[in-house]
């Protein structure tokens, strides 16, 4: 059985590595992103539509990202099974900022049973190398404020707080307004 050591002497059976996604990986990426959206909706943000990834528009968006030359979609595999992915690319930068070449990790997920084994780090390493090759001077990632696990991973990778986005719900419960 092929095994690769990752992280803290952890082994992943049949780990076959990190590679650029192909269109054949679309269904697996969609399924993993569906898990991400379910978790986000249940634990962090009820405004996330957990079914978006499986909608026609969601699938088309993932397909476009895989095919977009300004984006990179990576998959982590154990054998032929996709066990994680990362999507990212060149980010739009506000006119008032002095830094102009920012790349953003848009979405990342590693299946639960493979977490804590360094796969997220490997995905991020590969994305960072790709962004540097394209002249990136800065990376960014957006995470739900309550998602401490993801935030801790990003901080270990050198990400620091930059913006704080606050939202206010303007829809009031009709019982309270009567």
Image (cartoon, helix red, strand yellow):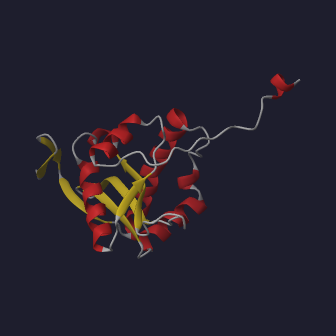
Task: Tell me which corner region of the image, top left, top right, bottom left or bottom right, holds residue 115.
Answer: top left
Query: Which residue of the protein is positioned furthest toward the bottom in this rendering?
Result: 69
Q: Position of residue 83 (x, y in %)?
A: 31, 51
* 64 sits left or right of 88 in the view: right
Q: Nearer the viewer, residue 94 or 34?
A: 94
Q: Nearer the viewer, residue 27 or 154?
A: 154
* 15 sits left or right of 59 in the view: left
Q: Position of residue 98 (x, y in %)?
A: 45, 66
Tally of marks: 0
Quadrant for the C terminus in the image: top right
Q: Is residue 173 above or below residue 49?
A: above
Residue at the spot 83% in from the left edge and 28% down from the top edge? 174
Q: Nearer the viewer, residue 146 or 23?
A: 146
Q: Position of residue 125 (x, y in %)?
A: 25, 58
Q: Is residue 127 above or below residue 117?
A: below
Residue at the spot 37% in from the left edge and 59% down from the top edge? 139
Task: Tell me which corner region of the image, top left, top right, bottom left or bottom right, holds residue 9.
Answer: top left
């Amino acid at each position: 059985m092929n095994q690769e050591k990752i992280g803290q002497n952890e082994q992943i059976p049949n780990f076959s590595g990190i590679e650029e996604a192909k269109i054949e990986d679309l269904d697996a990426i969609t399924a993993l992103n569906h898990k991400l959206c379910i978790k986000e909706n249940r634990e962090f943000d009820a405004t996330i539509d957990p079914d978006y990834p499986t909608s026609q528009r969601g699938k088309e968006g993932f397909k476009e990202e895989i095919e977009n030359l300004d984006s990179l979609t990576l998959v982590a595999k154990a054998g032929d099974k996709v066990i994680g992915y990362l999507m990212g690319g060149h980010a739009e930068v506000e006119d008032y900022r002095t830094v102009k070449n920012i790349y953003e990790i848009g979405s990342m997920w590693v299946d639960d049973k493979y977490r804590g084994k360094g796969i997220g780090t490997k995905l991020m390493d590969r994305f960072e190398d790709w962004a540097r090759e394209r002249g990136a001077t800065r990376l960014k990632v957006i995470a739900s404020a309550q998602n401490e696990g993801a935030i801790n991973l990003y901080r270990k990778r050198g990400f620091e707080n930059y913006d704080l986005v606050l939202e206010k719900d303007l829809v009031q419960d009709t019982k309270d307004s009567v």
